[in-house]
Image: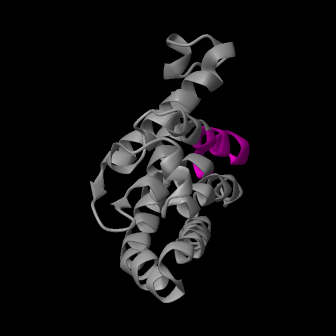
């Protein structure tokens, strides 16, 4: 029987809860890495959402994101710039937040292999899922600022960042899986 580092610290029955809590913590930390913009800040949230889904699968990834959103809904300052509460779910960024669990779920179905083709497909998937988040977010934002402004303020400023975050997520995924594979070999 092989043991992992988490086996030494967490009872097997509690392992999914521990992993989930770490995922929520990672997502919260990514919320605080923020460049303030109005009406939507630039954060590492989308990258983290996609990584959680890709690394831990559709159900666990979406569950982590939904748990993080539930914490915010109850008032925990886990969103960008420490925001939380009902205002976040009714304000201009609500469409992006609603898209996150969908994106995490879908990221769980991206290729898992370590060959170049799998990495390329994963990168393409991350780019597409960033597009999904931006599209759903801008659709909601349009109700506040109009369609043209939603595209100009809610999509265009985020395109370069989405490409960079997709590339970084692809690299981090490969590194995580490579380290996991090396750890299991010992």
Total numbered circles? 0
Q: Is residue 183 left or right of residue 3?
A: left
Q: Position of residue 160 (x, y in %)?
A: 37, 77
What residue is drawn where x is 45% and y is 75%? 154
Quadrant of the rendered structure where residue 61 is?
top right
Please say if 48 is above or below 170. Answer: above
Majority SS type along the magenta span: helix
Would residue 59 be counted in the magenta stretch? yes
Q: Nearer the viewer, residue 45 or 126?
A: 45
- Please, which colouring scheme is shown? one colour
Would residue 119 be counted in the magenta stretch? no
What residue is drawn where x is 59% and y is 75%? 139
What residue is drawn where x is 58% and y is 31%? 20
What residue is drawn where x is 67% and y is 57%? 102
Q: Is residue 32 left or right of residue 132?
A: left
Q: Position of residue 133 (x, y in %)?
A: 57, 67
Q: Residue furthest left?
A: 35
- Residue range highlighted in magenta: 54-66
């Amino acid at each position: 029987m092989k043991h992992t580092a988490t086996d030494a610290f967490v009872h097997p029955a509690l392992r999914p809860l521990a992993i989930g809590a770490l995922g929520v913590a990672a997502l919260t930390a990514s919320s605080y890495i923020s460049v303030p913009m109005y009406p939507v800040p630039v954060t590492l949230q989308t990258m983290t959402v996609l990584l959680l889904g890709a690394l831990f699968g559709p159900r666990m990834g979406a569950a982590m994101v939904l748990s993080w959103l539930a914490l915010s809904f109850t008032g925990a300052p886990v969103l960008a710039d420490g925001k939380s509460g009902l205002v976040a779910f009714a304000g201009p960024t609500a469409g992006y937040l609603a898209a996150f669990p969908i994106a995490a779920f879908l990221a769980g179905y991206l290729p898992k292999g370590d060959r170049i083709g799998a990495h390329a497909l994963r990168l393409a998937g991350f780019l597409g899922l960033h597009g999904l988040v931006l599209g759903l977010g801008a659709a909601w934002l349009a109700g506040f600022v109009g369609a043209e402004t939603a595209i100009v303020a809610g999509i265009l400023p985020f395109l370069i960042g989405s490409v960079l975050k997709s590339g970084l997520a692809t690299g981090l995924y490969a590194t995580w899986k490579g380290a996991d594979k090396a750890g299991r070999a010992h």
